[in-house]
Image (cartoon, helix red, strand yellow):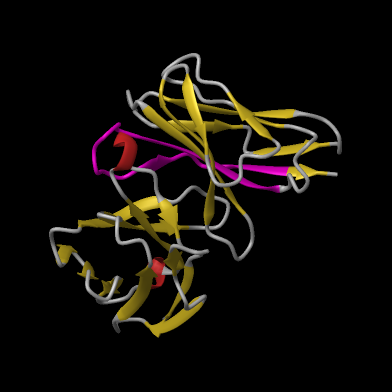
Amino acid sequence: DGGITQSPKYLFRKEGQNVTLSCEQNLNHDAMYWYRQDPGQGLRLIYYSQIVNDFQKGDIAEGYSVSREKKESFPLTVTSAQKNPTAFYLCASSLQGVATEAFFGQGTRLTVV
Amino acid sequence: DQQVKQNSPSLSVQEGRISILNCDYTNSMFDYFLWYKKYPAEGPTFLISISSIKDKNEDGRFTVFLNKSAKHLSLHIVPSQPGDSAVYFCAAAYSGAGSYQLTFGKGTKLSVIP
């Protein structure tokens, strides 16, 4: 079954700790994205990657970092510099350069205590 | 500055009636529009899309209308069913830099009352 997998579904961390969220896809998509959702807000773009070893900042990249060493994987690190890290994080992927839908993972709920 | 706006945070509709969800955008470069459906604690799932070269796209009970001059699109669900109760996100994209990044609205929570 092709799809996009995020893990874990729920994550708890102490304030001041870095944490890495996993995102893997087997759809052979070139483009991958990280979004953040807060209550009453839409999905806001954190980072995106159009190709392996390349990525760009989205609208709210401060306090986050990413890597794209493999086509299938796009992990997101929430660093201690992120002021309000508690949120629902969504990873997505899509075909590069084609007007088509993005496929989303099931999300990771990060709670920082 | 919000480029994609969904001005109704919530909508309640009786089962069997039509649900109309609205979306406005400000960026005239957007050339592709999508609707996603989202249940709590899950990722959004794609519902229907429309290219800027069209003004209507239909898929079963779902129809999306695009009015480019007004920078407005709407999603019609007919007939509405209780299982349609979810948050609906409007999204827009443009082909700048070869990547169709999506810009989302804040969502409209649809409740279909049995």
Q: Above or below — where is A46 with respect to B73? A: above
Q: Above or below — where is B68 with respect to A101? A: below
The answer to whether residue B99 of the structure is visible from this angle is: no
Instruction: Verify whether residue B60 appears in magenta.
Output: no
In the image, B69 versus A9, the foreground residue is B69
Residue at horizontal 41 percent and vertical 18 percent from the top = A71
Left or right: B101 as drawn, with respect to A15: left
Residue A46, quarter of picture: top right
Residue A108, quarter of picture: top right
> How far across and how far down the image is residue A57, in percent?
54, 36
> How far across and how far down the image is residue B86, in percent?
46, 65
Residue at horizontal 22 percent and vertical 73 percent from the top = B69
In the image, B102 versus B112, the foreground residue is B102
Residue A81, quarter of picture: top right
Q: Quadrant of the C terminus of chain B?
A: bottom left
Left or right: B22 as drawn, with respect to B87: left
In the image, A78 versus A50, the foreground residue is A50
Q: Residue furthest top?
A: A69
> How far across and how far down the image is residue B41, in percent?
58, 52
Q: Above or below — where is A103 with respect to B55? A: above
> How far across and how far down the image is residue B84, in percent?
38, 67
Left or right: B106 as drawn, with respect to B78: right
Residues rendered magenta in the picture: A87-110
The answer to whether residue A107 of the structure is visible from this angle is: yes
